[in-house]
Image (spheres, helix red, strand yellow):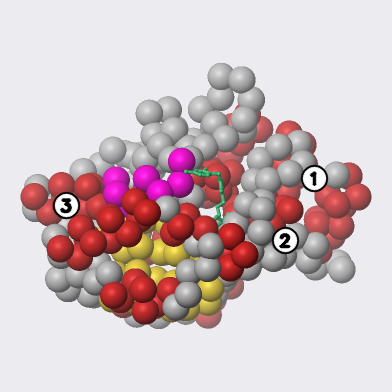
Amino acid sequence: MSISLSRKQELDDLCRKFRMDLIELLYSIQTGHPGGSLSVCEILTALYFEKARVDPKNPGWEHRDRIVLAKGHAAPMLYRILAEKGFFPVEEMKTLRQLNTRLQGHPCALETPGVELSTGPLGIGLSAALGIALGLKLSKIDSTVYAVMGDGELNEGTVWEALMSASKFKADNLVIIIDRNNVQLDGTADEIMPMGDLKAKLEAFGCEVFECDGHNISELCDAIDNAKAVKEKPAAIIARTVKGKGISFMEGESAWHGKPIGFEEYKTAMAELRGEE
Ligand SMILES: Cc1ncc(C[n+]2csc(CCOP(=O)(O)OP(=O)(O)O)c2C)c(N)n1
Ligand SMILES: [Mg+2]
C-alpha cells in the first residue's frame, strides 16, 4: 500500500534534517563523502523508516531484513540514519572518522551496530548480499536482502557475475537498489564507463527491473513493494537520483564526491537546506 501524504511529509522532513546534520558534520571534520551520501538519503530512509524489518534493540535478530550498503563510501548517511533509528546515540556521530571510533570512513560490520556488511571496495556488496539471501532461503527465513549500489559500482565485473548467479539460483528474496545518479568519483558515469541501456542489461542478466524517482519516498516505497512481490528471480530498482542532491553547487558534480567543505560553501549549503536561498 502506498504511504500517506502525511507520512511522506514526515519522511521528507527527516531527510532534510539528515542532510543538514551531514553537512554540519562533514564541515566540522573536514573529510568524508558528501555527494553519494546526499544521493542515497531517500533510498536509505525509505528502507529503514518504512519498508525494512529491523530492530535496533536486537541488531542481530534472525528475522531482520538485511540492508547491505554496497556503496560503502556513503557511510555518513547510513550512520546518521542508523543513529536516528536508535542503533547508537546520535551524539556518537561526532566521532565519525576519528581515531578509535566505531564510525569508520567505510562501514564496519564487526564494530557498528546495524551495519550488515563491511564495505568500501566497490563490487563486493552484491555477491555477499546474494550469499546472505541464499543462506536465508536454506534456513527458511523469510527476510529480504536489500543491496544498495552505486551506478559507477556497476562497472565492476563481479556485479555481473553475482547477477548471473542470483538469476540462476532464483534469488527472489534479493532486492537490488541502484542509486542511479550518473556520476562517479571523477567524472560522469558515461565518461568513465557507459552502461548503455541499464534496464535492458539488468533484464538480460535475469532481473525484473523497476524504475523510480530516487528522491521521492512514495515512489521508492511503491517500487520496493513491487520488487518484493517478484517471484523466482531477483528484482532491481533503478532509482534515478542526483549526486549531491539538495545543495545546488554540489548537484551533479563529481568534484563533490569527497572533498572538504569550505566555510563559505558550508554557509551557502546550510542556507539552501533551510530553504533560505
Ligand atoms: C574496487 C574499488 N575501486 C575504486 C574505488 C574508489 N571509489 C570510491 S567511490 C568511487 C565512485 C563510485 O561511484 P558510484 O558507484 O556511482 O557511487 P556514488 O555516485 O553513488 O557516490 C570510486 C571509484 C573503490 N572504493 N573500490
Ligand atoms: Mg554514481
Quick check: 26 left or right of 219?
Answer: right
Position in image of residue 195 (x %, y %): 48, 69
The residue under the point 73% across, 49% down is: 23
Neighbourhood count class around disc 2 (C-alpha, 10 Å): few under 14, some 14–19, many 20 upward: some
Of helix, strand and loop, which one carries label 2? Answer: loop
Amino acid identity at mark 1: Ile
Q: Give the mark nearest the N terminus, 2 or 1.
A: 2
Q: Which residue is mark 3?
A: 134
Amino acid identity at mark 2: Glu
Compared with 159, 1 (above or below) is below
What label sits on residue 113 in the rendered view? none
Q: Quadrant of residue 237?
A: bottom left
Q: Could you say which is closer to the camera, residue 43 or residue 15?
A: 43
Q: Which residue is mark 1?
A: 261
Amino acid identity at mark 3: Leu
Quick check: 273 left or right of 42?
Answer: right
Q: Could you say which is closer to the camera, residue 11 or residue 135?
A: 135
Q: Which residues are magenta?
A: 121-129
Quick check: 83 left or right of 141?
Answer: right
What label sits on residue 253 in the rendered view? 2
Locate the N terminus and report the quarter of the image it occupies: bottom left
Of helix, strand and loop, which one carries label 1? Answer: loop
Quick check: 264 left or right of 151?
Answer: right
